[in-house]
Image (tube, rainbow, N blue to C red):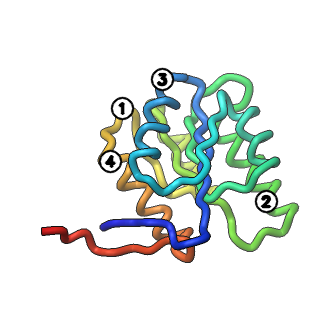
């Protein structure tokens, strides 16, 4: 599957992780996709929440275990924020975490988050999950073709 932005469209993503090397790796994976107009990074859930209130994102990728505000709290706070704005279209989340305990996953699922990637992950696994979420949530901004180059 090949994805590209439709003319005049923009896609933005927020990457929330307290580990700088993880953020750098995810940025590299996202840049390789050549889809995102804006890739914004946040060092923890609190920083991510502030940035998500300033700019609306098409996708938020978050770690679960972080200082100041954990990923679950970020998701909960942001969903409450979106509800207060009465946004019809909710921002999708991808959880990317090495510490994916059953309790956190159960809580995330109850909050409507169905996308979980465990760390470490390959570029292919990560990109595939991002594409799946974008295909479902940002289809109007994308041109999707079957990639059968010969």
What whole-number distance in Å separates the C-alpha atoms at marks 1 and 3? 12 Å
Q: Tell me the number on the disc at residue 125.
A: 4
Q: Nearer the viewer, mark 3 or mark 4?
A: 3
Disc 4 is placed on an element classified as helix
Q: Residue at x 40, y 66 (%)?
A: 3
Q: Could you tell me residue 141's position as x and y percent?
A: 56, 71
Q: Is disc 2 in contact with disc 3, using a CB cutoff of under 8 Å?
A: no
In the foreground, 103 or 133:
133
Residue behind mark 2: 82
Q: Earlier in the sequence, mark 4 or mark 2?
A: 2
What whole-number distance in Å separates the C-alpha atoms at marks 4 and 1? 10 Å
Disc 1 is placed on an element classified as loop
Q: Earlier in the sequence, mark 1 or mark 3?
A: 3
What whole-number distance in Å separates the C-alpha atoms at marks 1 and 2? 30 Å
Q: Residue at x 41, y 42 (%)?
A: 29
Q: Quadrant of residue 119?
A: top left
């Amino acid at each position: 599957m090949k994805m590209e932005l439709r003319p005049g469209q923009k896609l933005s993503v927020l990457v929330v992780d307290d580990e700088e090397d993880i953020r750098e790796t995810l940025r590299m994976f996202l840049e390789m996709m050549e889809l995102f107009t804006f890739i914004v990074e946040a060092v923890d859930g609190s920083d991510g929440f502030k940035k998500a209130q300033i700019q609306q994102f098409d996708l938020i990728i978050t770690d679960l275990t972080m200082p100041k505000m954990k990923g679950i709290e970020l998701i909960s706070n942001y969903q409450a924020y979106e509800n207060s704005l009465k946004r019809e279209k909710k921002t999708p989340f991808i959880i990317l975490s090495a510490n994916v305990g059953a309790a956190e996953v159960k809580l995330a699922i109850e909050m409507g988050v169905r996308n979980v990637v465990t760390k470490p992950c390959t570029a292919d696994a990560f990109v595939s999950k991002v594409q799946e979420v974008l295909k479902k949530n940002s289809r109007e901004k994308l041109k999707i073709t079957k990639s059968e180059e010969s």
